[in-house]
Amino acid sequence: MISVDFSRKIRAIVIDDSALVRNILTDLLQSDGTIEVIATGKTGLECVQLAEKFQPDVITLDIEMPVMDGLTALENLSKKNIRVAVIMLSVLTQHGAKATFQALELGAIDFVPKPSSAMKMDLQEIGTILKAKILGYFDHEVKRKAPRVKVKVGNFPEKKKVPIQAVGIGTSTGGPNALHSLFKQIPADFQHPIFVVQHMPAGFTKAFAERLDEFSKIKVKEAENGENVVSGTAYIAPGNYHMKVQRKDQNAFIELEQGPLVNGHRPSVDVTFDSLRACYGNALVGVIMTGMGKDGADSIKRVKEVGGFTLAQDEKTSVIYGMNRQAIEGGGIDQVLPLAEIVPNIIRIIKERGN
C-alpha cells in the first residue's frame, strides 16, 4: 500500500514526450492548490530517475515515448521497489489499448484515454479527467485510514434453492487486474453466462475482452446488440453503451443502448443488474468489486431482496474500496470475500442451488 501524508498537497510528476502536454497538464493539475507538480520529464528513463529522486505520490505517464517507453518505465519502478500510484495516458488505438492493459498488469492503477496525434486532442478535458482520478484515488486513501463502521453481513434469511442461471459482475478502478485474476480461476466446464460491467471508455472494451479471452478457459467477448445469450460465455459491456439482458419467449438476448449516464457512467452497473434481476430473478449471483463511486450499490441490493445471492470483494484486496463499500454498507451484500475466494464461492453457490 502506498503511504501518503495527507496534511500536505499531493505531489505529482508529469511524464510526456510533448512539451505542450506537460505544460497544460501541469497547469490544470495545480489549478486549485490540492496537487503540486514537483517535476516533469519527457522519457520513461526520466520517469524512473525523477521518481527515485523525489518520491512522489503519483505519476502521470505516457505510454509511447522515446529512449524508454511507459511500459518499460513501469517495470523499472517495480524492480527498484518504488511504490507510487501511476496513471497512464493511453492512445485510442488498438495498439494503445493493448499496451494500456499491459500497463495495468504491471501495476498502474488507472488510465486516461487520449486521441492519437492524427486526431484533435482536447487537453483541457484530459486534464480534468486526470485530476478527478487523482483526487478520487487519494480521497479513497484518506477514507481507508478513517475509523470503520462495522457492517454485519452473513446473517441473512435462507435463500430459496432455485438453480442459478447467470452471474453479473460490476467493477471500476482496479477492475481490469481483478477480472484478470478472477477469469483465470473459472473452470472450462462453467455452464452459466457471465455479464461484466467494467467502467471503461469506448475504444478499449473490445481489446479488453480479447485480452481476457486469451487466458480464460471460457469464451470472453464484447457484447453485441441483439445477440442471443450463450451458456459458458462472458459478455463485457461495450464502452459508451448500457448493456441490458432481455427475454423473448424462453431466450435471453443482449440489448445495447446509449441512454443517459447513470451514476455518471455508461455502461452502468445499475442498468445491467436491474435488467438481470428482471430476467433471472432469484436465479442470479451478483458480484460488486473494486471501484470508485457507488454504481451498482442500489441494484445489487434489489438482487438480494428478490432472493439472488450477492457477493462483494473485500477492502484488503481492492484498489479502491468504493463501489463495494457502498454496497456492503447499504445492506446489499450476503458475503464479503477476498478476490481469490470469489470464484470458488460462486461455484459453491451454484452447487448448493442444485445446478
Image: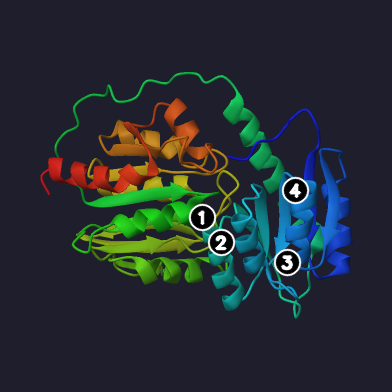
- Residues at circles 2 and 1 in contact by the CB criterion of under 8 Å: yes
Tell me the tag on residue 267: 1
The disc, 3 or 1, on the residue closer to the chain's N-terminal end is: 3
In the image shown, does 326 or 290 lie closer to the viewer? 290
C-beta proximity under 8 Å, tags 4 and 3 = no
Q: CA distance from mark 1 to mark 4?
A: 22 Å
Q: CA distance from mark 4 to mark 2?
A: 21 Å
Of callouts 4 and 2, the N-terminal one = 4
Q: Which mark is residue 44?
A: 3
How many other residues sit within 10 Å of disc 3, few (<14), some (14-19) or many (≥20)?
A: many
Asked whether residue 249 is in view, the answer is no
Q: How many marks?
A: 4
Is label 4 or label 3 in front? 3
Q: Secondary structure at mark 4?
A: helix
Closer to viewer: mark 3 or mark 2: 3
Q: Position of residue 23 (x, y in %)?
A: 89, 60
Q: Which mark is residue 315?
A: none
Image-quadrant location for residue 251: bottom left
Answer with left or right where residue 96 lies relative to residue 283.
right
Q: Nearer the viewer, mark 4 or mark 2?
A: 4
Task: Specify few, some or many for label 2: CA neighbours under 10 Å numbering under 14, 14-19, or 20 or more.
Answer: many
Q: Are marks 3 and 1 in contact (CB under 8 Å)?
A: no
Amino acid type, residue under disc 4 in the picture: Lys
State whether residue 156 is above or below residue 12: above
Mark 1 Cα shell of 10 Å, populated few (<14), some (14-19), many (≥20) = many
Q: Quadrant of residue 226?
A: bottom left
Q: CA distance from mark 4 to mark 3?
A: 21 Å
Q: Which mark is residue 131?
A: 4
Query: Residue 103: x, y in percent?
Result: 58, 63
Question: Which residue type carries mark 2?
Answer: Asn
